[in-house]
Image (tube, helix red, strand yellow):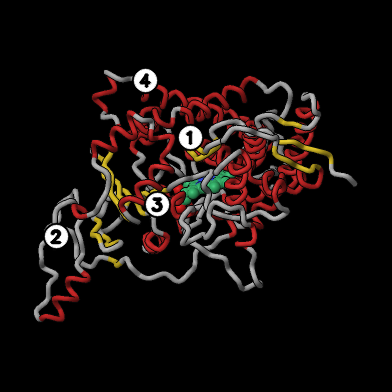
Amino acid sequence: MALQNKVLQLSCRSVLGEMLHQRFASNSRALRKSATSESLGICGTGEETLPGGLITPGARAEVVAQETRVKSLKEMPGPSAISNLIEFFYRDGFSRIHEIQMEHSQKYGKIFKSRFGPQLVVSIAGRDLVAEVLRMEGVAPQRGNMESWKEYRDLRGRSTGLISAEGEDWLKMRSVLRQLIMRPKDVAQFSDDVNAVVGDLVKRVDTLRSQQTDGLTVLNINDLFFKYAMEGMAAILYEDRLGCLENEIPQKSQDYIAALHLMFSSFKMTMYAGAIPKWLRTIIPRPWEEFCSSWDGLFSFSQIHVDKRLGEIQDLVSRGEKVKGGLLTHMLVTREMNLEEIYANMTEMLLAGVDTVSSRGEGDVGVDTVSSRGEGDVGVDTVSSNGRVTQEDLVVGGYFIPKGTQLALCHYSTSMDEENFPGADDFRPDRWIRKDAQDRVDNFGSIPFGYGIRSCIGRRIAELEMHLALTQLIQRFQIGVFPVTEEIKAKTHGLLCPAAPINLQFADRQP
Ligand code: HEM
């Protein structure tokens, strides 16, 4: 598969994936575990065999018991720790996580375990199992181990933001932000600002294509959409412009882009930074140093913009003038979060919003290259998998999973599963057409924005940015794929994205 066209198709399918909602009939294969791990004699790792205490007297009961016997993690299939170590650390598996998860799910089934050093991960690659896990969530779900993020923040006296916070801190921030950006009507107020950025994007397309001999091609559209996403996010979050779509990008914005690239390109490093025991940092210092320096860059950029707006507000107040503004102004005036929390949330939201929206932006444009209607699918070009740390003992897929286990929800695998999406490799926009207003094309195989109380808080912002850009670009240009001879694959680069630049042609639409 996958010439350039294919990459675009994948992107396109994810563009409207957000339409999906997550209610569909599922077999309840996961049960809330009533017994605790202690009562079953399971210890922390959960890898010990269960005692045979589930057998009830009588032949029939015995059959039932055998059929419903809850298996231990020890019985769960999966690659050996050593083969995983070689795959990830030696064969650069971090950039192929999506492929490895697919291979493993084909080999070991819809639920399997892997070991990364001391860390045990249970991967869930079945749509219904994903649904069950997410539907069982409590009030403050945990996505993954954020120790290294927290450590950096403690080291520098910074606060956690919505991505890195847990428990009470997370609940408090989430409830503040939920009221500001979760509903479509909340984000509609950003339309004028985003449309102004889209206007600059269109101008930039014009400039860039005029620099090519055919007068049509924009090289490396990935980069252009990245800049668009960044400019759009800054307009919303900072109520400010960064100049990313200008000929000369201001130095401060360039520094930020460098820090952001460092964060994503050192994705492996940051994985190691979390995985490498602290005492090893003296011997292998680079991963942790890069991790800290990229965060320094991201935080300082946000702080500059937050402080700038704060200064403007203070000036207005001192002159007795009325303070008007958007998201940041509201947060600074109401102080439902303290200043450090505002810095942290602005930093984490910008980080979360830039690469996700730009990766999908490629898909937006691709929509028009193949069809006038986009096809939604899982965010295969944005997040290949997501995570949850179990907050209590669970039984999933017949296996006992103790509290505190890291789960990987393999969205790429579920989205490419023929059972969930027949012709998963094909571009079929019609699979998302609703028969009527009541019809929901729901499928837990595709949840690009996650699910439930910990789902993406920026979803409506992302949709606004993508839809406004798509509308103006399609109105103005007939967009085509630049002929390619080489396959462009996807790679995991923090997010899942094309492994090489994509070039598109923008012809003027005939009136
Ligand atoms: C197409 C674009 C985007 C995609 C596909 C996307 C996807 C996701 C996903 C899958 C999650 C994890 C959800 C879960 O665990 O259930 C997430 C979380 C998050 N996203 Fe997005 N996102 C996008 C754009 C944005 C934007 C524009 C923002 C900025 C406001 C943003 C801010 C966040 C934050 C702060 C979280 C953490 C939420 C929490 O832990 O409470 N995202 N996103």
Residue 342 shows up from this direction: no
Q: Between disc 3 and disc 2, whose residue precedes?
A: 2
Q: Is residue 293 above or below residue 40?
A: above
Q: Tell me the residue that label 3 is attached to.
A: 409
Residue 390 found in image quarter: bottom left
How packed mark 1 is, by other alpha carbons closer than 10 Å (few <14, some 14-19, many 20 or more), is many
Marked residue nearer the N-terminal end (4 or 3) = 4
Q: Residue at x 77, y 25 (%)?
A: 212
The CA distance from mark 1 to mark 2 is 39 Å
Residue under pointer 2: 50
Q: Earlier in the sequence, mark 1 or mark 2?
A: 2
Q: Residue at x 48, y 40 (%)?
A: 341
Q: CA distance from mark 2 to mark 4?
A: 42 Å
Which amino acid does the dot numbered 3 rest on?
Leu
Where on the picture, by quarter, is residue 35?
Answer: bottom left
Percent coordinates x, y for residue 451 in the rendering: 47, 57
Q: Are marks 1 and 2 in contact (CB under 8 Å)?
A: no
